[in-house]
Each structure stands twice: as structure tokens, then as C-alpha cells.
Image: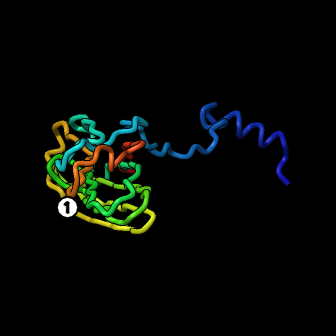
Amino acid sequence: MIKSWFLSACLVALPVAVQAQPYITPATPRPVLVFQSTTVNGNGADTTEDTLYTTTIPAGLLQNVGDTLHVVVKGTAAASTDTKVLRIRFGNTIVSNFNCVAVGQIAWYFDAYIMKTGSNTQSTTAIINSQTTTNTTINPSSITDTGAIVLLVSGQNNTNSVLNSIQSSSIQVWFMPAT
């Protein structure tokens, strides 16, 4: 049995910093909200591609391999058989391109990830869900990520000039640093 006076003597011999050190887990990088909007935006009364949301990703945000942007966008498409197209663009790369053609008010949801894979190279993955369809796209990208990059969500009615046949209701862009 160890005597209590022996333990006290051992603790006195240790530096104070060592005596009271609890185990601390290393900090985990947390996602940072880069852009958010709940403004409802719709396409124009034309058949051209119209911007629903746009933001600029700051220069140098994607510094390390594994740094990722997570983009979440949602909205609705009109109750018609018109060909309505939704797109997310990262610079000049189309991350996802989705056609809404079903009759009925279609709620849609984009969930996209853009990950730095090397010097000025990225991998983009997007899943879009609607009430009738799920679509997944995976694309490589070669955007110069040391400069500012435009992230754009657009809508287009290819068939008729119907105002607001595609509407977005919210977007969030998160930055997730590599671990």
C-alpha cells in the first residue's frame, strides 16, 4: 500500500502545470457560414437563363486540399409541363443541371459539395431532389481558387416566357476546412 505522504511528495516534485493538466481533445475545425439568403427569387418572363442567387467566394478561401464548400438551395417549380432548368455554377463549371418537367408544383432541393483536390482543381458533387426525381452529378473542376470565384444559382424556362415558373426560397453556403 502506498502511503499518502509518498503521493504528496511525488506531486510536489512535479511542476504545477503537469499536476493539473486534464486531457484536452484537439479542436475540430467547424463549418463557417459564408453566404445565406431567404429572399424569394424567380426567373424572368423570358426563356433565357436568369440568376436566382449569386455570391462571390473570397480569394484564397479554398487553400488546402480537402477544403470544401457545402451549398444548399431550395425552391419550387410551376405546375406546368414546360421544361424548367435549374443550375448551380462554380466559376465556369456547371456543378449541377436539372430539368423540371412534371406537372404539379414541384418542390426542389440542391445539396452540393465543392472540394479542393489539388492546385486549382476541385471535385463537385451535387444531389438534387424533387417530389418526382432524384439526380446526382459528379464533375471535376479546374477553377483558379487563389482568386475570387462566383457561385451562381440560375433558373430558366426553356418553353414559355412565364414569370416565376422557377423560384428559389433559400440558400446557404458553408465553408468546411480540411481536417
**Disc 1 marks which amino acid?**
Pro
Quarter occupied by the N terminus: bottom right
Whole-percent x, y for residue 23 in the image: 61, 45
Q: Is residue 164 left or right of residue 158?
A: right
Q: Which residue is mark 1?
A: 140
Callout 1: few (<14), some (14-19), or many (20+) C-alpha neighbours within 10 Å? some
Residue 99 seen by the camera: yes
Residue drawn at x 33%, y 60% as measured from the top left: 126
Element type at marker 1?
strand
Residue drawn at x 36%, y 62% as measured from the top left: 127
Whole-percent x, y for residue 96 in the image: 26, 58
Residue 117 seen by the camera: no
Identify whether 35 is placed above or below 26. Answer: above
Relative depth, front residue between 89 and 40: 40
The structure's colour scheme is: rainbow
Residue drawn at x 24%, y 36% as measured from the top left: 56
Whole-percent x, y for residue 50 in the image: 22, 44
